Amino acid sequence: MDEKEKNTGIKLEYEIIKDDFSRAGEASSNIKRVLRQLGIDSSVIRKTAIATYEAEINVVIHSEGGKMVVNIEPDKIEITAKDNGPGIKDIDQAMQKGFSTASQKVRELGFGAGMGLPNMKRSCDEFYIESEFGKGTTVKMIFKL
Ligand SMILES: Nc1ncnc2c1ncn2[C@@H]1O[C@H](COP(=O)(O)OP(=O)(O)OP(=O)(O)O)[C@@H](O)[C@H]1O
Ligand SMILES: [Mg+2]
């Protein structure tokens, strides 16, 4: 079996809780640890670590909560962050560097630079965002191996 085949079909799933700052970042650090154990290329790990952290924090601070799912396949890692609302009114605006609706309280914790979504998009090979205002947001990112 070649190196890449061994990682076929591994699926990781994490629940992300709204406003839970004490656990924010746990899912992304867990994902990083698993990818390391699987021997995934360190440059890919670095990129997925940035993207999963930003996605996780966005669900914590901007949404009603949701989940992150990681699918590791022989030739790619697919990461989906899906939340239960409230959704994004204007995706083009949300994608702009520096745009943020983060509250003062959240900014004091060090978030709210409006760089999360642009950094996620930059880190991955394929980026998809879907949002229905009032329903929820799904971000899907693909990293080629
Ligand atoms: N999952 C989400 N649900 C609802 N709104 C979101 C979600 N993710 C992002 N947004 C909206 O898009 C804006 C931009 O997101 P982005 O991650 O780029 O910046 P930020 O989270 O405000 O700040 P930073 O990520 O730099 O700490 C957010 O301020 C928020 O209005
Ligand atoms: Mg963000």
Image: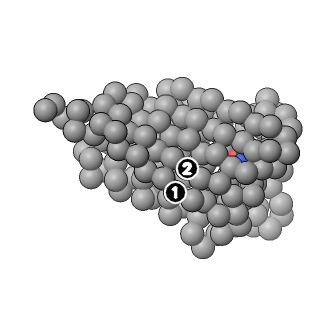
- Judged from the image, the secondary structure of the residue bearing numbered disc 2 is strand
Which residue is pictured at 70% across the width and 63% down the height? Answer: 18
- Res. 33 image quadrant: bottom left
- Percent coordinates x, y for residue 46 in the rendering: 42, 44
Label at residue 42: none
Looking at the figure, which quarter contains the N terminus?
A: top left
Answer yes or no: is residue 14 visible: yes
Which residue position is annotated with label 2? 68
Answer yes or no: is residue 145 visible: no
Q: CA distance from mark 2 to mark 1?
A: 5 Å
- Percent coordinates x, y for residue 128 in the rendering: 63, 29
Which residue position is annotated with label 1? 14
Sort mark 1 into few (<14), some (14-19) or many (20+) by Cα contacts within 10 Å. Answer: some
Is 84 in front, or is 61? 84
Which residue is pictured at 68% across the width and 49% down the height? Answer: 83
The amino acid on which the numbered mark 2 sits, given as a three-letter code, is: Met
For ligand 1, tell me if the residue under mark 1 lies within 8 Å.
no
Which residue is pictured at 34% across the width and 53% down the height? Answer: 34
The amino acid on which the numbered mark 1 sits, given as a three-letter code, is: Tyr
For ligand 1, tell me if the residue under mark 2 lies within 8 Å.
no
